[in-house]
Image: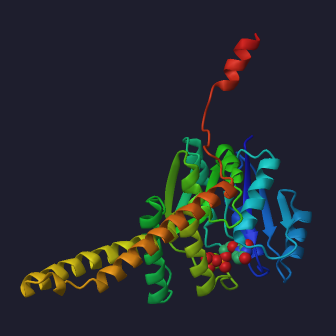
């Protein structure tokens, strides 16, 4: 029987863990072997003891506890590492607050059986949050798509997804310390499918994210998967270039009007040239820094999907 390993990051979730457990159990079919791995991300409340209690009653429940709060990204990484160690055929990452509806689990698995390596979910409609947060959220997805050229990450994309063995290996091969999972999914490639669902309210407790944290996370995503900072001197250089054209044109026009070469004003031109050089230098400096970063990030140069290299070796051995 195939093994499904469900990874559930939890941070101060004493109010939601049991609700989640009771709900998710209703959607686990008998034709797969399931494990639910709660990752306790340094909770300061009773989360860990609740996980331990559930584990003592139900053998399918696993837990893994961090020494402090490392963030949801680290929790997802640790959970997938555990999935690999337990030789699971597929892993599913989901939130504990039921905002990632468990009724989708059979649908995710079905898509996997159809041959998809990565099956994502997307929230079709937004919650009743403020207009401002809806605006920022939409703007983020638009800017992100523009700077990273990743058109796959649609507005409302969740971390809730299924990864098969190959996708788990690829995900774990990316050792970025500052992680942005949704960007990693695009980077690893493979056959991907999106499943949409309607917004679900948090079962209990409150969100662990605030505007500041979300804003930093958004900037991080763009920085890690695009040459985000390079755009700043690049745009500035173009602006100065147009200014230079304008000042030159204006200088020539004044000189022609006055019918005197002396009337040509060199001062704005000098200033424009100075800034143009400055922004060029900055642009190449950023480019250099990105190259240095790429080396230190040690992301895989490529990710293999299939090969018959082992077969060739075996044939030769015969
Ligand atoms: N979470 C985590 N570590 C953190 C913050 C959140 O493991 O530092 C978990 C949290 O317990 C939940 C999931 O990540 O299972 C999503 O968090 P939350 O519901 O607060 O985010 P939102 O749904 O508001 O984006
Ligand atoms: Mg939530």
Residue 121 on image: x %, y %: 54, 61
User: What residue is drawn where x is 60% and y is 38%?
Assistant: 305
Q: Nearer the viewer, residue 261 or 179?
A: 261
Position of 183 relative to 69 (above/below): above
Closer to the camera in the image, 120 or 185: 185
Quadrant (top left, top right, bottom left, bottom right) of the N terminus: top right
Q: Position of residue 58 (x, y in %)?
A: 86, 61
Locate residue 125: give its quadrant.
bottom left
Label count reads 0
| Left or right: 220 in relation to 195 | right
Q: Is residue 112 above or below residue 241?
A: above
> Residue 47's quadrant in the figure?
bottom right
Quadrant, the C terminus: top right
Left or right, 236 with reference to 188: left
Answer with the quarter of the image where residue 183 lies: bottom right
Q: Position of residue 308 (x, y in %)?
A: 63, 25
Residue at figure coordinates x 53%, y 45% from the top left: 191
Q: How is the image coloured?
A: rainbow
Name the one closer to the observer, 10 or 99: 10
Query: Percent position (x, y) of residue 284?
Result: 50, 64
Q: Is residue 148 above or below residue 140?
A: above
Residue drawn at x 64%, y 61% is 293
């Amino acid at each position: 029987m195939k093994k499904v390993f469900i990874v559930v990051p939890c941070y101060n979730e004493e109010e939601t863990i049991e609700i989640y457990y009771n709900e998710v159990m209703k959607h686990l079919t008998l034709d797969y072997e399931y494990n639910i791995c709660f990752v306790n991300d340094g909770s300061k409340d009773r989360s860990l003891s609740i996980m331990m209690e559930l584990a003592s009653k139900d053998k399918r429940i696993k837990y893994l506890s961090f020494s402090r709060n490392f963030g949801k990204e680290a929790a997802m990484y640790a959970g997938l590492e555990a999935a690999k160690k337990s030789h699971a055929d597929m892993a599913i990452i989901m939130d504990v607050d039921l905002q990632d509806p468990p009724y989708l689990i059979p649908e995710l698995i079905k898509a996997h059986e159809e041959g998809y390596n990565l099956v994502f979910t997307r929230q079709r409609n937004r919650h009743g949050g403020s207009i401002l947060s809806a605006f920022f959220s939409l703007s983020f997805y638009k800017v992100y798509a523009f700077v990273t050229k990743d058109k796959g990450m649609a507005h409302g994309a969740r971390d809730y997804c299924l990864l098969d063995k190959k996708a788990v290996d690829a995900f774990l091969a990316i050792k970025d310390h500052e992680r942005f999972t949704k960007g990693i999914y695009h980077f690893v490639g493979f056959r991907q499918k999106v499943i949409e669902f309607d917004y679900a309210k948090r079962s209990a407790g409150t969100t662990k994210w605030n505007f500041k944290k979300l804003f930093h996370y958004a900037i991080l995503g763009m920085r890690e998967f695009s040459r985000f900072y390079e755009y700043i001197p690049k745009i500035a250089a173009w602006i100065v270039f147009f200014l230079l054209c304008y000042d030159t044109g204006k200088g020539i026009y004044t000189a022609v009007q006055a019918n005197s070469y002396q009337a040509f004003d060199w001062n704005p031109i000098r200033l424009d040239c100075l800034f143009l050089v400055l922004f060029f230098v900055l642009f190449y400096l950023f480019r250099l820094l990105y190259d240095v970063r790429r080396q230190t990030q040690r992301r895989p140069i490529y990710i293999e999907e299939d090969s018959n290299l082992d077969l060739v070796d075996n044939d030769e051995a015969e």
